[in-house]
Amino acid sequence: MLNLLFMLQHGSLASQRAIESFAQDRSYSPLRLVLTGKSQLVLYAAPSPDERDDRVCRFAWVHRIVLRVGKRSIGELSRKWVLLQEKSAAELVQYEWPEAKEWESLESPFKSPQAKVDVFNRLTLNADLFKDFLESESAFGEFSKAWRREHRLSNAGPQRTIFRPTFFLPIGLIGRGTSLNYVGFGNQNGAFALANCTATEEAWEEVVSEYLRLNKSPHIEHELRAHRNGRRDLSDFRIHEMRLASSPHCTLPLFHGMKSPHDHQEIYLRTSVDNPVSFDQRFRALYPKDDTGRSRLLWIAPPLRAGGESSEDSSNVRVDEWLGLKDILATVTMKTIVTVTFSSDSASFPYKSMMWAFDGKVDTSTSSLFDFKGWSGASTRHEYYRYQDEYDAEFQKLENQAIPMDKALPEYPQPKRPDKLLACWYLPA
């Protein structure tokens, strides 16, 4: 201790140069030299360029190196990554280099340098995992087992309401205010996600059996089986986000149940797009610019970028191409059928419902589609069709039982013709 104090007080220039040389030999930049309450000489040093990971946000950590000072050389006893704070009462500053100001009081949304590496590695692997989730018949058993286990745990308590575990697989990072969140594929009902996977009938029936174990009503069974009707409907998967702090190393399960940590609750991001099956359109819908002019989508797994593994640009995605959705997307043609069922004070009113068919996804909640004389009340139902053949089948059914607007009798009111209107029918009383 006395030797250390003597060196610091009487050989400060020589010791400073020796410590600078020690740092530069390791490609570090010395920042601050301190003496601790344990009589240890500690050097804070900026990392080498090869150690810095500046993806999404600046690398914030520095080396904290406990030095071993000998008469002829300087070595190290230990080191760790830390965030460089302002002066500490527990440390006596011996010397500070000008570069220290650039690193002082930096913060990071990541827990540590290793956590940052783990997050990006896991998100990249998750891109391939989503493909396996959809296409691997052999892997379905593992995914199904995880869902069934979470479903049983979630419904083991005395509650009367059945809890259906959610599905979430992060594949990127999104900026939200001053925080950083995971963004990825999600579904509010994990069983509906499984319905879009490749599986044997035997394996799928295990999911059905567990799903209906607590409620065997035909309605519930139909609801589940409707999601496995021979056509994979990837619009079932929404774009969800979850707080980065909920899993600092991105070690998230695929399914989240009632017993999952509260931080693991994901948020559904609402997007308005022409093609709800297209992931590219939905990710690009997350691009509203804030006052900085930057996209909210900050990073996406390299396989999902337009430039592939060699691209650093996460703003141009190619998820549809990567999943092989070209043929499926060509069959998507969004249609909306709105049914207004009304009540009338007059028993002689000639019809009970009116139906409108629209091109695209249309919300008529603010339209006056049912503003007619004689009605004392009305209820509205929207039905959305994603594929032309589904819409054609429903259209044919209506043609057989309803009266087209253009062929209606004079006493039938002619309603407004909103934009994107394809057809209008009356259902007789």
Image (cartoon, rainbow, N blue to C red):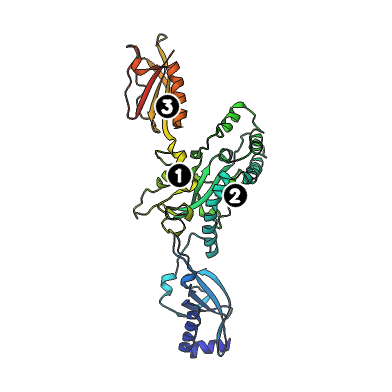
Kindly state the secondary structure of the residue where label 2 is placed. loop
- For the C terminus, the quadrant is top left
| Of the pair 100 and 417, the residue shown nearer to us | 417
Query: Which amino acid does the dot numbered 3 rest on?
Result: Ile
Which numbered circle lies on residue 337? Answer: 3
Question: Callout 1: helix, strand or loop?
Answer: helix
- Res 427 → quadrant: top left
Q: Is residue 358 above or below residue 120?
A: above
Amino acid type shown at disc 1 = Phe
Give the mark nearer the N terminus: 2 vs 3: 2
Question: How many angstroms separate mark 1 from mark 3 (CA)?
Answer: 24 Å
Q: Residue under circle 1? A: 279
Mark 2 vs mark 3, CA separation in Å: 38 Å
> Closer to the N terminus: mark 1 or mark 3?
1
User: Viewed as shown, does residue 184 lie left or right of 290?
Assistant: right
Residue closest to the eye, 79 or 287: 287
Select label 1 or label 3 by which is in front.
1
Question: For the residue labelled by badge 3, is the local secondary structure a helix, a strand or a loop?
Answer: strand
Q: In the rendered image, which residue does mark 2 sit on? A: 253
Residue name at image x 33 percent, y 20 percent? 415
Q: Earlier in the sequence, mark 2 or mark 1?
A: 2
